[in-house]
Image (cartoon, helix red, strand yellow):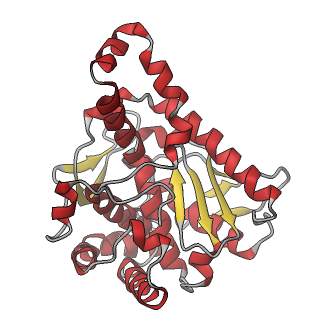
Amino acid sequence: MCWICHAKTSAADTAATHRPWPPRRAFLLAAGSAAAAPVLAQVDVGRASGMRNLVPADQLERAAGQQYAELLAQARAKGALAGDGNPQLRRLRAIAQRLVPHTVQWNERARQWRWEVNLFESKSINAFCMPGGKIGFFSGILDQLKLTDDEVAMVMGHEMAHALREHARERMAKTTATSLGLEVAASLFGLGQLGQVGANLGSQLLSLKYSRDDETEADLVGLEIAARGGYGPNASVSLWNKMSAASQRQGGTSFLSTHPSGPDRIRQLQANVPRVEGLYRQAQRGGSAAPATPAAPVGVTAPGPAPDYQTPVGRAIRVQ
């Protein structure tokens, strides 16, 4: 599913494939700053690692934006970028409209992100969300799997969660620390090495590998975001059942090469569905599942007017 999430193949992660993926603990209250009303999270995920501070967030987001723009330009040149009138693209953007308002509780920086959603014409079964809210779907995941809106929301929520929980930033920081060693410490005291690291961020974004724990966290956070947006949480299970069936038919997909659909993963999702059912029902009724503070609007790449979409809580977000 992720453009940049490949399963890490360390000995520890290899061993992890033979046991249930444990949920990370203790992160129960998201976005508890004075600037936003705290919202109690219903899924258990871990605390963010301080290691990520080795890579400045704004620098990574700028690099991701540049890489995303390059991807769009390449796809457009090949006639593989869906136009704004494409029904599937409009569908994706409408779903994003309902999810974006529920992202700030997981990352305060998301308040300033300019979310973009684009569709690449490709048979690949894949999707991604880069740091800064740059989302891409491949038409293959929609056409081949015949995903419902609820299932699309689960895919999108998962990818958003990778960006919100800054998994790419953490992976890059760990890679930086390993490759630079003591030079990292020197850079922190103003000796300039970190600037060289920043120059390579864009190229690294497309080759990072996420850990099993990252994948578990993205599953759970994405599940909650989708439920708060009014999408049925049971779709998280049906999505992975579809992926498993597709893998058996096709002998593996790019989606499953980075997101193994084992029984442990499905069981963990099933165990967490009841935790977010109440959020889903509230959203369906237009209730209190929505956060108190708005997020930045979803953006498009082409100029010109675009329609307003209505969120489940009655607040219109202008697509610019």
Give the x, y percent position of residue 118: 67, 60
Front position in the image: 85 or 177: 177
Q: Is residue 89 above or below residue 178?
A: below
Lateral position of residue 188 relative to residue 146, left or right: left
Q: In this orientation, does residue 144 appear?
A: yes
Front position in the image: 182 or 115: 182
Residue 107 is drawn in which quadrant? top left
Q: In this orientation, does residue 314 appear?
A: no
Give the x, y percent position of residue 186: 32, 12
Q: Is residue 180 above or below residue 313?
A: above
Q: Residue at x 41, y 34 (%)?
A: 35
Q: Is residue 293 above or below residue 145?
A: above
Front position in the image: 146 or 251: 251
Count of labels in the image: 0
Residue closest to the far right: 304
Q: Is residue 61 above or below residue 100?
A: above
Q: Residue at x 41, y 89 (%)?
A: 248
Give the x, y percent position of residue 266: 28, 78
Q: Residue at x 55, y 40 (%)?
A: 203
Residue 228 is drawn in which quadrant? bottom left
Lateral position of residue 71 relative to residue 192, left or right: right
